Structure formats: structure tokens, C-alpha cells
Amino acid sequence: MVEFDMSYQEFCKQYPNEDACLDKIFKMRYGGMKECPRCGHRKPFTRIKGRRAFQCRNRKACGYQLYPLADSPLKCSKLPISKWVYCIHMFACNKTGLTARFLSKVLTVSPKTALRMLKIAREFLIENDRSPLKGSVQTDESFFYGSIPLMNKKRREKVYKEFNIDKKKQPRGRALLNKSLVLGLVEKDGRAITEIIPNAELETLRPLIYQFVERGSDLLTDELPVYRFFSKHYIHKTCNHQKKVYQSENGGTTNAVESLWSLYKRIFRAHVSVSKKYFPLYIKQCTYIFNNRKNTLEKMFSDLFVKMVHPILSP
């Protein structure tokens, strides 16, 4: 069980109200500023009452103002900053998926507002480290989205019409055209990189494998025939899942990437449906959670908090 580093009581002590949240953001952005950039006055800035801004103490001669929420998604938001901070805290600390319906009840906002808040939070979770994986790298593909029996009638009829699916003979597995295919690459005890792909053919996989896996590394896969073509540049090892062999004698296994899919599907299970338009954001969220699995929850919260309120400082 993961130790919860920042409890609700500790969070309330650090961010008890609107003023405390804004002061924290101001110190995060301008804490190193020792004097006013306009007049050189050395006394600290003061909060302007009723506004999300701070002003130079030398008001008569200067009156220079700073806006700590500038260039952030919170700039024009009418919601209290304290609700945004609590949303970031819940989103970062919840590793199995946070739904908009649940967040709307906690923050007493509409479900559409909660959905928008979560969408903005996911946009700042994009991984910046896309350097090639090396050492022992496992790769596999998995299907997401597109379970026809769970769709409502209107959406189900649209899928039938778009993909010419026979209602009496619904295709399964790789034949279900409205599913999204995701390629996963996992370094041993390290990072994961995921990409949404149209198919699992050689022309699709070859540029991605060459881009994200360093030449000469161990490439561990299942028995999909397309991976045989990578034996020239990689040490290719396989395991035969059809014979229920999950770790071969030569070290071939895909257990790490299977644990990645397990995490993904636990997160997706919390949602009734996921739009294909925003499906990449959910994939990025899952990858971020997997890559930060060894970090403390407090660090995940602070990293996301910095990215959202001060995008310029984020790496």
C-alpha cells in the first residue's frame, strides 16, 4: 500500500483558503524577486483587495502590479483558486482514475465544469522525456475503446453504419474497427512510452521501434510475426502466450508491459465512456501515472501544480 505523504489535514493547513492559495502561487512565481522591477523598491508586494493581483508598496510613485495567474489556465477562470488547487491535489493523488461526476460532487460544481477541469489537468501531464529506451525493452499492443454492448442505442447505430457492421454477427478482437490500438514500450524498471497506432503492421511499427528503442537493446515481445523483422538491429526474445508461456528460457517476457495495460484498464474502468477525441489525453494520463509510480504523491502534486500555475517554469 502506497504511503500517503500529504494527508487531507496537511493539505488544508497549507491551502486553507483563497488568499493562502494565491500567496503560494505568487511565491512560486516571484519568490526570488527582491525588489520592484520598475522602481527598485525593496519592500515586498502587497495583495490588492478583491483582485487576483499584487502591487508594489510604493503605490504613489510606482504602483507596479503583478498577476501570478498570468499565462496559466486559471487566468480567466471564475472558479475559486482553492477549488482548482484541490482538484489538482485529488487528480495527482488518485492513481486509479478520477471521474468528473465524483469531482463535481466534491467541489459542488456542475459535471461539465468538473470535466473541463480534468481535461485541463490532463493536458499538462504530457511527458517531456521521449528519449530512446535502452537495455531490456518490452513491447506489446492492446485495444481500448469500442465495446458495442455498452454503448447507448444512438451511438451503437452510428458505429454499425460507419463501419458496416452486421448487427447479428458482431466482429471481435482485432476485427472490431472502432477500437483504438495502442503500442506500449516499457524499459525494465524504468520508463514507458505509448503511441496510438492505426494498425500493428510493419510499416507502422518500424519507425516507432527505431525511434524509441536504442539499437542493440534487448527487444522482448510476444509471437506476433511482425517483430521477427527487428532481429537485425535488436536482440529479439519472444514468449509464446498461446502455449501459456509467459517467460521463456532465453528471458523473453512481456510481464512489465502487461502490468502497464493492467493499470490502463483499471483507470478506464472508472469511466462510463471515453470520447475518441480526448482518448489521447487519457492515454497520456495513464503513462504519466506509470512513469511516476515510484515518486511520492506529494511530489506528483507539486509537479502538476507547478506545470499548471506556472507553465514557464515547468521543464
Image (cartoon, rainbow, N blue to C red):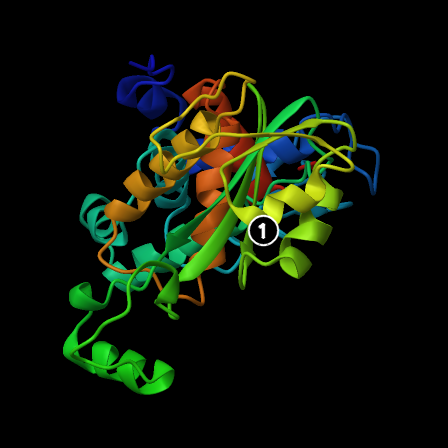
Q: 310 or 213, which lies in front?
A: 213
Query: Where is 181 relative to 296, above or below?
Result: below
Residue 314: x, y in percent?
66, 37
Query: Where is 48 relative to 192, above or below?
Result: below
Query: Where is 281 relative to 178, above or below?
Result: above
Residue 183: x, y in percent?
53, 48
Residue in view at x 58 percent, y 45 percent: 126
Query: Where is 292 relative to 168, above or below?
Result: above
Residue in view at x 49 percent, y 19 percent: 295
As drawn, the residue found furthest toward the front would be 243
What crowding class fits label 1: few (fewer than 14 Cα within 10 Å), some (14-19), or many (20 or more)? some
Q: 90 or 200, which lies in front?
A: 200
In the picture, the quarter occupied by the C terminus is top right
Q: 58 or 50, which lies in front?
A: 50
Q: Determine which quarter of the picture holds residue 261.
A: top left
Residue in view at x 64 percent, y 52 percent: 205
Query: Relative to 56, is 238 on the left or the right?
Result: left
In the picture, the quarter occupied by the N terminus is top left
Secondary structure beneath dot 1 equals loop
Q: Is residue 121 visible?
A: no
